[in-house]
Amino acid sequence: MSKKIVIVGGGPGGVAAAVRARQLGAETILVEMKHLGGVCMNLGCIPMRILGSASEAAAAALGAERLGLLPLTPELDPEALKKRLDRTVNYLRLGTRSLLKTNGVTVIEGNAALTPSGQVQVEGKTLASDAVILAVGADWAPPEPSGAPLDEVGPPDLALDLTRPHRRMLIAGEADWAVELAAFFSRFGRRVILAAPGDFLPRFDRQIGSRLRAILKKDGIEVLRQTRVGAVKRSANGLDVTLTVKGKTETRAVDRVILADRTPRTGPLDLPRAGIETAGGAVVVNSRLETTRPGVFAIGDLVGPPYYSHKASAHGITAAENAMGAGREFDGRNIPSVVYTRPEAASVGLTEKQARAEYDRVVVGEVPYGFNARAMAELEDGGVARAVFGTRYQKLLGVHLLGPQSAELITQAVMALKLEATADELAALIAPHPSYAESLADAARMALGRAMYAPNPDPAA
Amino acid sequence: MAEGVYVPIWGLQMEEATVSEWLKAEGDPVSEGEALLIIETYKISGEVNSPADGVMKRRVGRVGQVLKVGALLAVVGAADDPETEVERVIREMPFVTDQAVSEPGATPAPATERATAPAAGEIADADPDAPLQATPLARKMARDAGLDIRTVTGSGENGRIFARDVEAALKSGPASPAEPPAEPLAEDRIVPLTSLRRAIISKTMQTVDIPYGALSRTVQVDRLLDFRRELADAFERKHGLKFSLTHLLFKAAAQALGEVPILNARLDGDRIVIHGGKNIGMVVTPPGGGGIMIPVIRNVQAKPLDRIAREWSGIIGRVRSGTQTMEDLTGGTFTISNVGALGIDVFTPVIHPPESAILGVSRIVEAPVVRDGAIVVGRTLSLIIGADHRVFDADPIGEFLAAMDRIFQNPAEMLI
């Protein structure tokens, strides 16, 4: 008799878990309370990429003269863009439904709760199962600002309503899409303040953050670090927002406040009743993604940051395999981070700072795209490729990229880390010419003291 | 219909063979009787031929792999035979679970992995022909720590060896330098066993239970060496062969064995077989070293020195070219081990079972000897008999060595 697995949540984690469970022969039920696809498909990655593609086309048009074209003036057509967004998202939802159907996953719509024995209940009906995978994701963090709730203050959903015009925005949050939202609206003429609670892009090498900050500043975005959002009050001039910037209080006038931080959605499931512990707002799981109640697994945003779709789907596969008895540990070290700005930032592995804390000595190869032929030909020479290595075996520890197509290029680094490459292998890589990948190979050579196209740092320095 | 090609048996003592070279690739057309591959035993190497016309469907044995007699080497069949037909032959072969004796290198990968078809939906096993999979970091760490990467068990997909596996191996191993060593490590070298070394191990281990004794007598060899020197030119002119001490050792031993036949015997269950023929082997090192071989001259007692010289010359030529035959290496009843060239004075020669005696010959040294009541400088060597004391005691050894000594002092006896 086949095992029965119930999955709660139809986002990227839940869908991957369901398909994998079916592949392994389980009878699989997926419970979704609203739309399949989760935040990623409905509000996050995919809508942001749709907006981003428009924003990038606009940026390219704005740069047309530099490239040798007659000037072009791109203009946003909010109705058309919104239509494209809705159509694409709807199409992807249908695709997800069909994916689950062709894999033989039973989809139930409704609100799920857990029984004290760790079984899933939907609308009062208990779904008996051998294992449960919780994949209900994260909520937008509740607004911190005091005062009465205001229509102009809310999560990114609010920003996605392109038809309601606004001129000045404050976007607050550490999440990468706070940066992406800021880049989009700034491209189309909004004045944008981006307020990060801590460092700007903490998952990236400092050099990537500071280069991108300079580029965003040139695009008209004001980036504030170590900034908390306080009271928001309606005024004659729109909204007055009180900010604490590096300990100092100041007030800014804006038309809209977007709060882009997230927190695991632990509330609705009544986890304590089922004996499932949480810590710091996230569900506690072991290395096999099993919660404190045996047989119940939790994945994706629900177990805390990073809030990435690709982490959730990788979790989903491992959790499904473990629900079937595989006993596999999830290796979370090499999950890439990407920010779809122009240019893109991407990173995987340790930052230089983390590496220095963990290893006695590290060596960094850094090749600015000013030394990259493709970047120069395409007027994209503001980027950089950085690779961090240990010194004993020249083990690759992390890669940090800023430049066009970094999200694609970083996958090479993910593979290199997965296969435990060292500087020797990366240095011997034959990258196509001209390409951005060439700089990654040269960064590895620089770590070995023999960069070919970029100047090697003075070893005495 | 596909057919299996199996390790043939070339002699009663043959138990296994090493795959040494493939002559046909998968997909090559083959005809009946055509050579498919070369295998070698510790004695000889030879071709294995196709049992039928068709194409080489699958090479099962791998170069360097040691396989038992009867194990599957290859599958040949018609060009349009389906894969399932090939799999059927592999499944049906004898020794399915135990055909490989050892693998090239030390990688444990049973040769029959392919025989078990993966169940539907499962991920198939790693290709056994695939090279050892280890990440670059794992390789570097192992090299740095002086650890043979092939001894590490991989935890990754298809057994890929990751850094964590090397760390675990170092932690569990006896020597685990936590700190980088100050001096570059002298790396251990892993040498896979050759079939020759394997045969030597097997033979020498058979001697462990033998109640062994070694008895020695120092003999003067001035007259023997003079005899050789005096005859050398004439011998070479007449027979076209160099005349050497080796030939004299064969002949002298055969004559001494004729006088003391019990040294030319073997224990056979509850009886002793005293051989009529003095089939004498001589220990030699094959080209490239790596072990020893013991080619045999049969019925030495009946052969004059020139015949001994001719046969020995033929045997040595074949050993040097690697074309020695089963005949050359089997059937011995007594063995001589001359370690003079190694500068050895004293040693205990190892018996070559099922024989019960071996004659060791040491180096020749100049030594004070008493001749006609005066001390003069003479040349001597030691003759040592290594004996299986189940078969005989000290007396016949003394007699044998005395006979050898007498012949050495009267070498012309060997011409009679």
Image (cartoon, coloured by chain):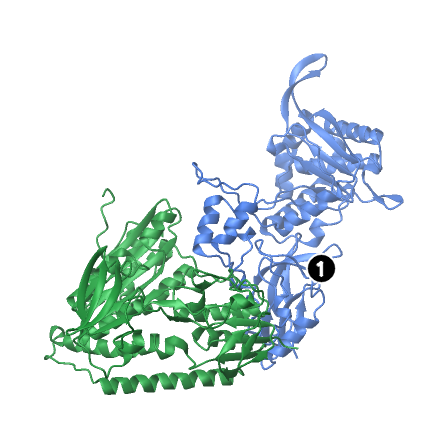
Chain colours: A green, B blue
Q: Return the residue found at the far top.
A: B373
Q: Quadrant of residue A327?
A: bottom right
**Residue A445 sits above or below residue B124 on the image:** above
Query: Going by the image, does B3 lie left or right of A80?
Result: right
Instruction: Write down the chain letter for disc 1.
Output: B
Query: Which residue is pictured at 53% across the width and 50% down the height?
Result: B168
Q: Foreground residue, B400 or A262?
A: A262
**Residue A54 sits above or below residue A431 on the image:** below
Observer able to see residue B111? yes
Query: Which residue is pictured at 16% across the width and 82% down the height?
Result: A75
Query: Going by the image, does B151 lie left or right of A460?
Result: right
Query: Which residue is pictured at 42% across the width and 84% down the height?
Result: A95
Crowding at dot 1, Cα within 10 Å, few <14 / some 14-19 / many 20+, comes out as: few
Q: Foreground residue, B66 or A119?
A: A119
Mark 1: secondary structure: loop
Q: Foreground residue, A284 or B413?
A: A284
Query: Going by the image, does B118 lie left or right of B165?
Result: right
Kind of residue indicated by mark 1: Trp
Query: Residue B233, percent across and down?
Result: 61, 35
Q: Quadrant of residue B95?
A: bottom right
Query: Residue B182, percent across and down?
Result: 43, 36
Observer able to see residue B295? no
**Residue A30 sits above or below residue B212 on the image:** below
Query: Residue A345, percent across and down?
Result: 28, 65
**Residue B408 sits above or below residue A218 on the image:** above
How many discs mark residues in the rendered view? 1
The residue wearing badge 1 is: B10
